Image (cartoon, rainbow, N blue to C red):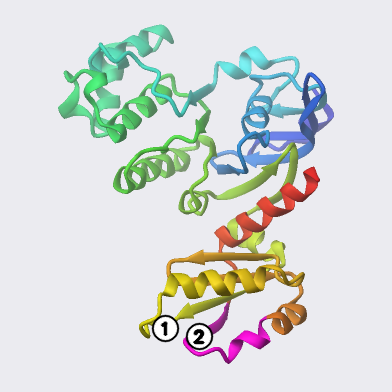
């Protein structure tokens, strides 16, 4: 057992230290250390190509790190990766079941593939649990995006995994289906299933128990949403534009352009007919916006930074790392 695993308490599903991974000359993950508790929904955020998928695969033994050590589900990620994979369900963004088989046939096939006892009964239970019982005979290829998502989730949990990996599972799915999907994920987590999910949706990140922001191989932030927002040190002002006959979009664009060149302003982001203006130095930011406070038709208020404000700020910081 590794040093990290020797001290991982039973309630910890994943505990790793110093994980690094290279592909050729490119360092994809650099010295990552983190832990995930059992029954936790852990969200991974970050730009494309930032190392999220590579990190997830190393955490659960699907990919061997070049450096570092740790455990997943009490098993060594280096020496017991095959055993780890037996307890992992992996749901990819792309629907990967058989479109020319019915919903029930897909579930029964997966049950038989994994040696689930009484596969017909197991498939029926999955149909009922996920609200698919009225669609058992429907071809999987005829399902909408949201129903395909339910079917894929049902197939993943049929073998009763201890760890579920979700790679942007709700891309292209309507808001109601996304909400229903997340209700199911929280039910599964309440039963003890550990979930790792990568997402670009801020509302989904806020549904996670903890999140981690990874950019270009580096872990820049982690913790609960409240901890990540507080740890960002962002000071944010929201500017509302009055409906006084002027084009609010033009007003916002002009204000954004005027503020963007100020070194105290680290982020300017439009939200409808409002503008979020953020910085890390409260006094310097106040001085930067002072000339615009008296401008007619603008209403300024200081608010707590949103997770999206923090996400944009972290993206900008991660881009600076590449320069």
Disc 1 is placed on an element classified as loop
The residue at the point 33 percent across, 9 percent down is: 109
Answer left or right for 126 relative to 205.
left
Where residue 228 appears, as percent x and y from the top left, is 65, 58
Along the line of sight, which residue is nearer the eye, 280 or 273? 273
Residue on which disc 2 sits: 299
Where residue 105 appears, as percent x and y from the top left, is 26, 12
Where residue 154 appears, as percent x and y from the top left, is 35, 26
The residue at the point 67 percent across, 68 percent down is: 260
What's the mark number on residue 242?
A: 1
Along the line of sight, which residue is nearer the eye, 170 or 15? 170
Q: How many marks?
A: 2
The residue at the point 31 percent across, 32 percent down is: 145
N-terminal label among 1 and 2: 1
Answer left or right for 191 relative to 63.
left
Q: Quadrant of the N terminus?
A: top right
Q: Is residue 298 magenta?
A: yes
Asked if residue 307 is positioned above or below residue 235 in the image, the reply reads above
Cβ atoms under marks 1 and 2 closer than 8 Å? yes
Give the magenta range. Answer: 289-302
Separation of residues labelled 1 and 2 (CA atoms): 8 Å
Along the line of sight, which residue is nearer the eye, 303 or 181? 303
């Amino acid at each position: 057992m590794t040093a990290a695993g020797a001290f991982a308490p039973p309630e910890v599903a994943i505990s790793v230290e110093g994980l690094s991974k290279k592909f050729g000359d490119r360092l994809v993950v650099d010295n990552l250390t983190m832990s995930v508790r059992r029954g936790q929904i852990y969200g991974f955020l970050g730009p494309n190509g930032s190392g999220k998928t590579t990190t997830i695969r190393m955490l659960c033994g699907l990919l061997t790190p070049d450096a570092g050590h740790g455990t997943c589900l009490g098993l060594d990620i280096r020496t017991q990766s095959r055993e780890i994979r037996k307890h992992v369900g992996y749901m990819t963004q792309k629907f990967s079941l058989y479109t020319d088989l019915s919903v029930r046939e897909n579930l029964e096939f997966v049950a038989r593939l994994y040696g689930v006892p009484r596969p017909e009964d197991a498939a029926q239970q999955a149909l009922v649990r996920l609200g698919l019982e009225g669609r058992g005979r429907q071809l999987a290829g005829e399902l909408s995006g949201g129903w395909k998502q339910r079917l894929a989730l049902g197939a993943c949990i049929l073998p009763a995994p201890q760890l579920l990996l979700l790679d942007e599972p709700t891309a292209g799915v309507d808001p109601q289906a996304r909400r229903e999907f997340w209700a199911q994920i929280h039910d599964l987590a309440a039963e003890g299933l550990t979930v790792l999910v990568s997402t670009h949706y801020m509302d989904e990140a806020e549904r996670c128990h903890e999140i981690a922001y990874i950019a270009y191989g580096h872990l820049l932030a982690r913790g609960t949403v409240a901890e990540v927002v507080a740890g960002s040190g962002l000071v944010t002002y929201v500017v509302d534009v009055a409906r006084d006959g002027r084009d609010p979009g033009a007003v916002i664009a002009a204000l954004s352009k005027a503020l963007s060149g100020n070194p105290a302003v680290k982020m300017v982001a439009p939200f409808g007919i409002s503008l979020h203006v953020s910085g890390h130095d409260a006094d310097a930011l106040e001085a930067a916006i002072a000339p615009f406070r008296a401008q007619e038709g603008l209403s300024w208020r200081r608010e707590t930074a949103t997770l999206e404000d923090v996400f944009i700020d972290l993206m900008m910081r991660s881009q600076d790392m590449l320069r």
